[in-house]
Amino acid sequence: MTEGSTVTPLELFFDLVFVYALTQVTALMADDLTGRGLLRGVLVLALLWWCWCCYAWLGNTVRADEGLVRVVLFAVMATMFVVAVTIPEAFDDLPGGLSGPVVFATCYLVVRVLHLVLYFFAARADAGLRRQLLRAALPMLAGALLLFSAALAPQRLTDSPQHVEAIRTALWVLALVVDYGGIMVIGSQGWRIFSAAHWTERHGLIIIIALGESLVAIGVGVTALPISWPIIAASVLAIAVTAALWWAYFDVVSIAAELVLHRAEGTARAALGRDSYTYLHLPMVVGIILLALGFKKVLAYVGDGTEHELSAPLHGLGLLALYGGVILYLLGHLGFRLRNMRSVNWPRVATVLLLVALLPVADHLPALAALGLLAAVCVGMVVAEVRLFGAARRELRDSFLAEHGAGAAPGH
């Protein structure tokens, strides 16, 4: 991999498995819209994200569509698909068949081991990277051991379903803390980001995939229901929110972040890529999936067609997912910009505070009105940023697009 390399078609194909996995996570939370269900969904999503990040790092070192790497990635795709299929049983085994938690943990371990073996092979000429991979194997194996413990141990320790659930969830949390924290502890010395363009494009595409899941949630929310004006209105408003989130990332932020990463070198570039992408993109993805859950809930309300449902407020966790998803997404952006560009986007700080303040108001509004209020705030944020930073935005976009052979930025 060299500077200027871009994402390969096989990496795009690889991401299709994660499209399905994100759909499964949304369904998992929607089927159990409780604090427990949301926590489980976030834990599964954090684990899936870590798997995806591993192969993003690998793809920045060696081309994914050449030689042995291609074959191994197909095997990883098959294994990850089994992980995605098993998500509904990741915590609770369903009657009959194999043990869902054990299958989930086994496939996760296979995905992680294949990554390390393939990465170690690709780094055969880089002793520093190989040493870092050996260090990274320790938290990975410890995390996998904790997942197997979560799958097997609770039933042997207690007969109480509540205690089994609590122990299993605690072991999942500990597994993620060990894995995420371990990579931070071993430091960035030895990691490599060879192409800033590939790195930023790869993460931009996963943001698009997550946003795509929010669009899927809109359609799934009204499956088999007759079309109506409330459904049309809710769909348009949901698209407006999603478009505003897309704009917030791709209009300027992704461009500026790529330029910063391109200027960094060596260990500083690896640390920047690890912190601002591997870690700080996770809250963005989690926020989008929570938003998708909120969309699904709103569409279920307005699609019912009865006067009661149309006027019913979106109370509780459905409303929290809707507004909290956008809040978490914007908080991820603020952290990303602070780490990457050492600056704060004050309109987004104001938007976060406004959404927090509006939560009690939205709790008393009909679901469709609550979605409309969210859309107005998100679109208003975009309009405010364009007006406040118009000259700087145009200069940055024109410079970037001219350098990439696209001419002037459209739309102004």
Image (cartoon, helix red, strand yellow):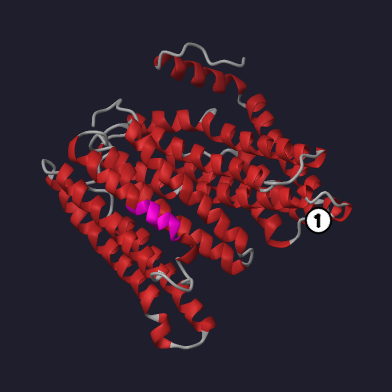
Classify residue 140 as left or right of residue 222: left
Q: Which quadrant holds residue 203?
A: top left
On whether residue 80 falls in the magenta region, the answer is yes
Q: Main secondary structure of the magenta part?
A: helix
Q: Nearer the viewer, residue 305 or 274?
A: 305
Residue 276 visible in the current orientation: no
Spot occupied by residue 363 in the image (x, y as percentages of width and height): 78, 56
The residue under label 1 is: 313
- Is 344 placed above or below 5 here? below
- Amino acid, disc 1: Pro
On whether residue 380 falls in the magenta region, the answer is no
- What segment is highlighted magenta in the picture? 79-86
- Is 240 placed above or below 183 here? above
Q: Which of 33 and 397 is in front in this view?
A: 33
The residue under the point 79% across, 46% down is: 368
Classify residue 360 as left or right of residue 178: right
Q: Which quadrant holds residue 182?
A: bottom left
Mark 1, secondary structure of its residue? loop
